[in-house]
Image: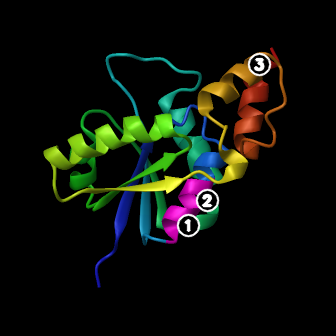
Amino acid sequence: MSTRTAVYPGSFDPVTNGHLDIVERALALFDHLRIAVAYNKDKPGGLFTREDREAMIAEATSQYGDRVSVDSFHGLLVDYARDNGAGAVIRGLRAVADFDYEFQMALMNRHLCTDVQTVFLMADEAHFYTSSSLIREVATLGGDVSAQVPPCVLRALNDKFSK
Protein backbone atom coordinates (compact mmCIF):
# COMPACT_ATOMS: atom_id res chain seq x y z
CA MET A 1 0.00 0.00 0.00
CA SER A 2 1.39 3.40 -0.96
CA THR A 3 1.54 6.36 1.37
CA ARG A 4 -0.67 9.29 0.44
CA THR A 5 1.46 12.41 0.86
CA ALA A 6 0.42 16.04 0.59
CA VAL A 7 2.38 19.28 0.80
CA TYR A 8 1.11 22.22 2.86
CA PRO A 9 3.11 25.24 1.65
CA GLY A 10 3.19 28.74 3.07
CA SER A 11 5.36 31.43 4.56
CA PHE A 12 4.18 30.58 8.11
CA ASP A 13 5.64 33.84 9.46
CA PRO A 14 4.54 32.89 12.07
CA VAL A 15 2.56 29.67 12.14
CA THR A 16 -0.90 30.22 13.67
CA ASN A 17 -3.57 28.05 15.23
CA GLY A 18 -5.45 28.45 11.95
CA HIS A 19 -2.56 26.77 10.15
CA LEU A 20 -2.55 24.01 12.77
CA ASP A 21 -6.27 23.45 12.27
CA ILE A 22 -5.61 22.90 8.55
CA VAL A 23 -2.76 20.51 9.43
CA GLU A 24 -5.03 18.41 11.63
CA ARG A 25 -7.77 18.22 9.03
CA ALA A 26 -5.31 17.43 6.23
CA LEU A 27 -4.01 14.51 8.29
CA ALA A 28 -7.53 13.08 8.30
CA LEU A 29 -7.21 12.85 4.51
CA PHE A 30 -3.54 12.00 4.00
CA ASP A 31 -1.04 9.62 5.59
CA HIS A 32 1.82 12.11 5.55
CA LEU A 33 1.94 15.90 5.39
CA ARG A 34 5.05 17.84 4.37
CA ILE A 35 4.78 21.37 5.72
CA ALA A 36 6.95 23.43 3.40
CA VAL A 37 8.11 26.92 4.30
CA ALA A 38 8.28 28.89 1.07
CA TYR A 39 11.06 31.43 0.72
CA ASN A 40 12.66 33.51 -1.97
CA LYS A 41 16.41 33.07 -1.74
CA ASP A 42 16.90 36.40 -3.54
CA LYS A 43 14.60 38.28 -1.19
CA PRO A 44 15.46 37.64 2.47
CA GLY A 45 13.17 39.01 5.08
CA GLY A 46 10.25 38.32 7.30
CA LEU A 47 9.78 38.54 11.02
CA PHE A 48 11.36 35.15 11.70
CA THR A 49 14.12 33.39 9.81
CA ARG A 50 13.26 30.38 7.69
CA GLU A 51 15.03 28.16 10.23
CA ASP A 52 13.08 29.68 13.13
CA ARG A 53 9.80 29.12 11.29
CA GLU A 54 10.71 25.50 10.59
CA ALA A 55 11.61 24.94 14.26
CA MET A 56 8.36 26.51 15.51
CA ILE A 57 6.28 24.42 13.09
CA ALA A 58 8.13 21.26 14.11
CA GLU A 59 7.48 21.99 17.80
CA ALA A 60 3.83 22.90 17.21
CA THR A 61 3.20 19.68 15.25
CA SER A 62 5.36 17.28 17.28
CA GLN A 63 2.30 15.36 18.53
CA TYR A 64 1.81 13.95 15.02
CA GLY A 65 5.17 12.18 15.04
CA ASP A 66 6.44 11.02 11.67
CA ARG A 67 3.13 11.81 9.94
CA VAL A 68 4.34 15.42 9.62
CA SER A 69 7.67 16.61 8.31
CA VAL A 70 8.84 20.20 8.04
CA ASP A 71 10.99 21.49 5.24
CA SER A 72 11.50 24.60 3.14
CA PHE A 73 11.67 25.28 -0.56
CA HIS A 74 12.10 27.96 -3.17
CA GLY A 75 11.04 27.75 -6.76
CA LEU A 76 7.97 26.08 -8.20
CA LEU A 77 5.71 24.38 -5.70
CA VAL A 78 4.74 21.61 -8.14
CA ASP A 79 8.41 20.74 -8.63
CA TYR A 80 8.85 20.50 -4.87
CA ALA A 81 5.70 18.36 -4.54
CA ARG A 82 6.71 16.01 -7.35
CA ASP A 83 10.31 15.72 -6.06
CA ASN A 84 8.96 14.74 -2.62
CA GLY A 85 6.37 12.21 -3.77
CA ALA A 86 3.34 14.35 -2.95
CA GLY A 87 0.19 13.91 -4.99
CA ALA A 88 -1.60 16.88 -3.50
CA VAL A 89 -1.13 20.44 -2.30
CA ILE A 90 -3.17 21.61 0.68
CA ARG A 91 -4.43 25.17 0.71
CA GLY A 92 -6.49 26.79 3.45
CA LEU A 93 -9.23 29.24 2.51
CA ARG A 94 -10.67 31.95 4.73
CA ALA A 95 -12.60 34.25 2.44
CA VAL A 96 -13.70 34.75 -1.15
CA ALA A 97 -10.56 36.78 -1.82
CA ASP A 98 -8.45 33.77 -0.78
CA PHE A 99 -10.40 31.55 -3.17
CA ASP A 100 -9.90 33.84 -6.15
CA TYR A 101 -6.11 33.89 -5.72
CA GLU A 102 -5.82 30.22 -4.78
CA PHE A 103 -8.03 29.12 -7.69
CA GLN A 104 -5.71 30.91 -10.14
CA MET A 105 -2.68 29.29 -8.53
CA ALA A 106 -4.31 25.84 -8.58
CA LEU A 107 -5.07 26.17 -12.29
CA MET A 108 -1.51 27.22 -13.06
CA ASN A 109 -0.11 24.38 -10.95
CA ARG A 110 -2.35 21.89 -12.78
CA HIS A 111 -1.10 23.32 -16.08
CA LEU A 112 2.49 22.79 -14.93
CA CYS A 113 1.93 19.33 -13.44
CA THR A 114 -1.23 17.27 -13.87
CA ASP A 115 -0.01 14.70 -11.32
CA VAL A 116 -0.37 17.09 -8.36
CA GLN A 117 -3.89 18.02 -7.25
CA THR A 118 -4.89 20.99 -5.10
CA VAL A 119 -7.13 20.34 -2.09
CA PHE A 120 -8.87 23.34 -0.55
CA LEU A 121 -9.81 23.21 3.13
CA MET A 122 -12.02 25.91 4.59
CA ALA A 123 -10.77 27.64 7.71
CA ASP A 124 -12.61 26.84 10.89
CA GLU A 125 -14.81 29.78 11.89
CA ALA A 126 -12.69 30.25 15.02
CA HIS A 127 -9.73 31.10 12.76
CA PHE A 128 -11.53 32.77 9.90
CA TYR A 129 -9.92 36.17 10.49
CA THR A 130 -6.52 34.96 11.68
CA SER A 131 -3.56 35.61 9.42
CA SER A 132 0.16 35.69 10.01
CA SER A 133 0.34 39.33 8.92
CA LEU A 134 -2.37 40.33 11.39
CA ILE A 135 -0.62 38.38 14.17
CA ARG A 136 2.65 40.18 13.37
CA GLU A 137 0.96 43.58 13.42
CA VAL A 138 -0.89 43.02 16.70
CA ALA A 139 2.18 41.50 18.39
CA THR A 140 4.35 44.40 17.21
CA LEU A 141 1.95 46.80 18.89
CA GLY A 142 1.91 44.82 22.14
CA GLY A 143 -1.50 43.18 21.70
CA ASP A 144 -2.47 39.76 23.05
CA VAL A 145 -2.31 37.05 20.39
CA SER A 146 -2.15 34.11 22.80
CA ALA A 147 -5.44 32.62 21.54
CA GLN A 148 -4.28 32.67 17.91
CA VAL A 149 -0.83 31.07 18.08
CA PRO A 150 0.74 27.97 19.62
CA PRO A 151 2.80 28.46 22.82
CA CYS A 152 6.15 28.21 21.01
CA VAL A 153 5.18 31.10 18.72
CA LEU A 154 3.89 33.18 21.62
CA ARG A 155 7.27 32.72 23.39
CA ALA A 156 9.13 33.74 20.22
CA LEU A 157 6.92 36.80 19.71
CA ASN A 158 7.35 37.83 23.35
CA ASP A 159 11.13 37.41 23.07
CA LYS A 160 11.21 39.49 19.91
CA PHE A 161 8.99 42.34 21.08
CA SER A 162 9.71 42.55 24.81
CA LYS A 163 13.10 44.16 24.19
Disc 2, SS: helix
Q: Position of residue 91 (x, y in %)?
A: 44, 49
Q: Residue at x 58, y 47 (%)?
A: 19
**How crowded is the residue under tag 1: few (<14 C-alpha within 10 Å), some, or many (20+)?**
few
Q: Residue at x 61, y 42 (%)?
A: 56
Q: Position of residue 113 (x, y in %)?
A: 16, 50
Question: Where is the N terminus found, in terms of image quarters?
Answer: bottom left
Q: Position of residue 157 (x, y in %)?
A: 73, 28
Nearest the camera: 70 or 95? Answer: 95
Q: Amino acid at mark 2?
A: Ser
Q: Is residue 11 left or right of residue 81?
A: right
Q: Which mark is residue 65?
A: 1
Look at mark 3 in the image and give the residue it sits on: 161
Name the dominant secondary structure of the magenta segment.
helix
Q: Is residue 22 magenta?
A: yes
Q: Is residue 26 magenta?
A: yes
The alpha-carbon separation of the residues under discs 3 and 2 comes to 26 Å
Q: Amino acid at mark 1?
A: Gly
Q: Position of residue 87 (x, y in %)?
A: 27, 62
Nearest the camera: 16 or 56? Answer: 16
**Earlier-in-chain disc, 3 versus 2:** 2
Look at mark 2 in the image and give the residue it sits on: 62
Q: Is residue 152 left or right of residue 85?
A: right
**How crowded is the residue under tag 3: few (<14 C-alpha within 10 Å), some, or many (20+)?**
few
Question: Where is the C terminus found, in terms of image quarters?
Answer: top right
What colour scheme was applied to this rendering of the protein? rainbow
